[in-house]
Image (cartoon, helix red, strand yellow):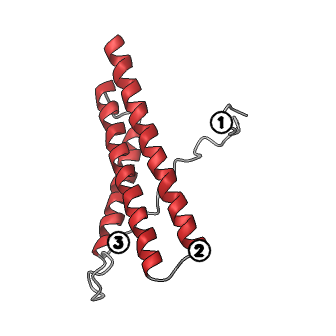
Amino acid sequence: MTATGHSDKQPSQSGRHGPERRSGARRGSDSGQTGQSADIAWQVGEAAAALADRLRDPSVAHSVEEIEKVLRGFSATVDGMSDGVGGITEWLRAAGHTGQLTGHSSVVADRMSHLGKELQRLAEAIQEAQEDR
């Protein structure tokens, strides 16, 4: 076990699988539904999966400065997602879905906010390490 409580013997692909990729028409494009928010969210997910593929690919060169910027981008993305899940929580409450569902949604938004801050700290640590070099 590591200090964070995770097993040292995790499979090598653990945590490396993004959302299942979609193909074909976008939701709402032929169904008559608006679905713009869902489409945007799906595009963000697909872009994140494509970026993850690039970051894992050993044949793609990256600089330390670029990695710092990637982490800052991740932080901004997660902050936006946290705000979005917070908005979903409020929408659920307004729609009468109170209790466990909105509680869970609120907790997820809080955790995402924390993760965004941690990503920002990591980017700052990389920047400081680069300046100390």
Residue under numbered circle 2: 99
Where residue 39 sits, quadrant-wise, is bottom left
Specify the amino acid type for callout 2: Gly
| Viewer-closest of 86 and 5 | 86
**Above or below — where is 102 with respect to 121?**
below
**Position in image of residue 61 (x %, y %):** 32, 30
Where residue 94 sits, quadrant-wise, is bottom left
**Above or below — where is 117 with respect to 23?**
above
**Position in image of residue 60 (x %, y %):** 34, 34
Question: Which marked residue is nearer to the observer: mark 1 or mark 3?
Answer: 1
**Position in image of residue 102 (x %, y %):** 53, 70
**Above or below — where is 127 with respect to 108?**
above
Give the Cα distance between marks 1 and 2.
31 Å
Label 3: how many residues lie within 10 Å, few (<14), some (14-19) or many (20+)?
A: few
Say which residue appears at 36% left-offset and 19% top-offset: 128
| Viewer-closest of 80 and 43 | 80
Q: Earlier in the sequence, mark 1 or mark 3?
A: 1
Give the Cα distance between marks 2 and 3.
24 Å
Specify the amino acid type for callout 1: Thr
Q: Which residue lies furthest to the right in this view?
A: 1
Q: Which of marks 1 and 2 is nearer the N terminus?
A: 1
Residue under numbered circle 1: 4
| Residue 38 numbered mark, or none | 3
- Describe the element under mark 2 as helix, strand or loop: loop
Specify the amino acid type for callout 3: Ala
Image check: 76 left or right of 20?
left
- Describe the element under mark 3 as helix, strand or loop: helix
**Figure quadrant of the N terminus:** top right
